[in-house]
Amino acid sequence: MKSKRRNFRYNSFRNVTGMLLVSLLLAAASAQDQTVKLDQRPAEPGEWGYRPAAGAVSQVNPPSFSWRPQQGLTWEIECAQDMKFRKIEYRAKNMEFNVHCPPRTFEPGTYTWRYRGKDKNGSYTNWSRARNFIIADDSATMPLPAREELIARIPKSHPRLFVRPENLDRLRKSARGKMKGEYDVLVKECERLLAGPPATKEPPKYPKDIVRGGDPWRKIWWGNRTYTIRALNAAATLAFTRLLGGQEKYGAEAKRILLECAKWDPVGSTGYRYNDEAGMPYNYYFSRTYTFVNDLLSEDEKEICRKVMKVRGDEMYRHLCPRHLRRPYGSHANRAWHFLGEVGIAFLGEVEGAEDWVWFTMNVFYNVYPVWSDDDGGWHEGSSYWSSYQGRFTWWADVMREAMGIDAYDKPFFSKAGYYAMYLLPPGKVGGGFGDLTARRTAERNVPLVSGFAAQAQNGHWQWYVEQLGGPDPADGYIGFVRGGLPRVDAVPPDDLPKSRLFAGTGQAYLNTSLTDAENSVQVVFKSSPFGTQSHGYEANNSFLLWAYGKRLLIRSGYRDSYGSKHHKEWMWSTRSVNNITVNGRGQGKRTAKARGKIVAFKTTPTIDIVVGEAGQAYETPLERFTRAVIFVKPELIVVYDRLEAKEPSTYEYWLHAINKFDVQGRHKIQVRNNDVVCDIDFLTPSDLSLRQTNQYDPNPRPRITLREWHLTATTPEKSKRMEFVTLYHPHKVRDDISWRGTLRSVPGGYVLTAGASGKKLTALLPTDDIKTLEAAGMTTTGAIKLKLEHPDDQPPQILELQGNGRQ
């Protein structure tokens, strides 16, 4: 009886277990058949997003593809010439990154692309939505070679950076011949280094109680950078000069410095994550020295170097990959990626992971670079960071060309990059526009970078620019030697160019009366950027600057005493620091990609320029609108027309900034002066503004900074949901007796502005309503600004109309 019960329980257990197993197997099979859900959320501010976007026109062939990453998936993309994908023109599978540049070109024309993911079990997601795009007929040819082909191009032996082994004889011949002068300079530098070698003791870490960002902290932070560069760039210079035929003692000293620096803790004071300003130059200068001096190192010594750079390379790679392919807008990361590329090439085949570093780097270059611009050639972070970061990038361009046969300057961006300098900083200009560290930048500081750009692009306009500023200034040291001297470029004056230009991708417009001589020019700089206020391009949208006849008149204010200091964050990053408008004392989002603006309209002619920006959504408390139009009647009159609409009755504060104290001449007229140049300013509406000014920042910079500038605030007397400002600016030299007199009258649907001087008369219809018709002075408009400029001679009046109501 007991035996039967045991058998019954056993059989019951077996049956239940069997049914459970079958159920699990069926569930697993069902799960295998189910589609993994694809994450197709729109890109957020700060993300690279889906590219090519629907309707985009690609100026490169093939285009670079980008989509939202999703953990645990590999990727497949398809391209077809029809929305139903009946005939697949291109397919790529099993991709690890969320970006892809094909290894072959497409025929120009219209295409549609889609993507899907696959998990580790082999289950696919659904296909993404399809996006159509066009490859332009004149697109630049830039396929990314397949991984195996790309890696195979890199030399197996050393040197690998800036020069290939098979090209050494050519460089040695140049050192004895046409470039003997440059070689002698290198030899002289090596003798100096031997006479006074750099220190190689490991630099200190921060004390435990140090305040991050304070002056003592900054001294160590930046000091360790310069200390590292002195040591390892000296080693690279010595090693390279020895390769050209220099004395063996140069190589011996380079080797000594290299091995001494190899003793430093790779995650210590010069570690990339501990202090990237020291870690980045350590990594690339160490790699250059290693490849230049490689034949002098024993296998044990090579292994010491490899172990060091394994740790350092992995640290950079983990920080950058894959994050940089999705969110590439980090400032320092935008030089770190190509420094990692140098490390990868130098240690390829010798350090595990080096091939991954190179492949990642090339995917960055082809798919998400440059980030702070588009094909127009501007730079969101400003002219100082443009020069610094692009200058360093040219090193990577040299490395790619030599090691892999890839020409960076084929990218459309580089065919226009030099115009950014020409339009923002014409010869003689002081003040580099918006962006960190640009307030006192001179045009001359652009010469080294634009010299290289002019030679690489063979652009005569850029060559003319550098010649006006003293002539080309090629790179020095071993990099200058490798470049072999810049090829000759015939200078072409910019007579065939418009005087003003829009850089749409960065949301900046430069309105000039001359590109040849800033001393006799008037310039308005305007910003309303799709990049927002992030990174070093933190100034608020719809801000403007005014320069006239060699002098800064209306400026961006403040002085960066230290990055991220209270003054930097609370004043310079705030809307109050620029020529802009706050609402109820509050401004736009600080240093964020979310605070976006947009230039919604632009037109340039020889006599009038108009630019319109919209920035309502950029405010911390978003506005229904903030539409600012700048009308430049060259060269004597600027009209700034502002339309604001808040969600509740508000007060509005109009901010202006200057080097010197404003001369307040009543409730609506003021004047700013800088030496022999003045600007008369007239607030035509609203009336009864409350004006106040101060030469104190809020907060002031650190005590060592004694600079003070003047800040004027014009505050509206009453609260209102809607507000318009119409303000006239008349820049001129003190000796010039030219006075633009303006009148403004309110009519149904908007304002009619009339202003005249020197026989010229401007009539402007300024709408306050997007749907009502505004009629005056024989003109009619609905929602658009319309202008008529009459001249003193018999030429017909000039009439312009620009639709830029901010609602587009």
Image (cartoon, rainbow, N blue to C red):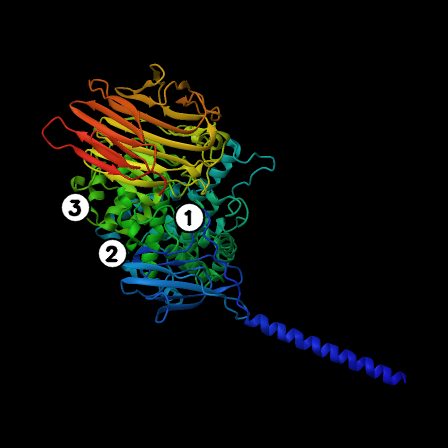
**Of 458 and 670, which appears nearest the observer?**
670
The quarter holding residue 210 reads top right
The quarter holding residue 147 reads bottom left
Q: Residue at x 23, y 33 (%)?
A: 787
The residue wearing badge 1 is 334
Q: Which three-letter amino acid code belongs to the residue tagged 1?
A: Asn
Whole-angstrom CA distance, mark 2 to mark 3, is 28 Å
Q: Could you tell me residue 776's position as x and y percent?
A: 24, 29
**Of 683 and 478, which appears nearest the observer?**
683
- Give the label on residue 173, or none: 2
Q: Give the farthest residue toward the right.
A: 1
- Give the label on residue 212, or none: none
Q: Could you tell me residue 640's position as x and y percent?
A: 31, 29
Whole-angstrom CA distance, mark 2 to mark 1, is 36 Å
> Mark 1 or mark 3: which comes first in sequence?
1
Q: Which three-letter amino acid code belongs to the residue tagged 2?
A: Lys
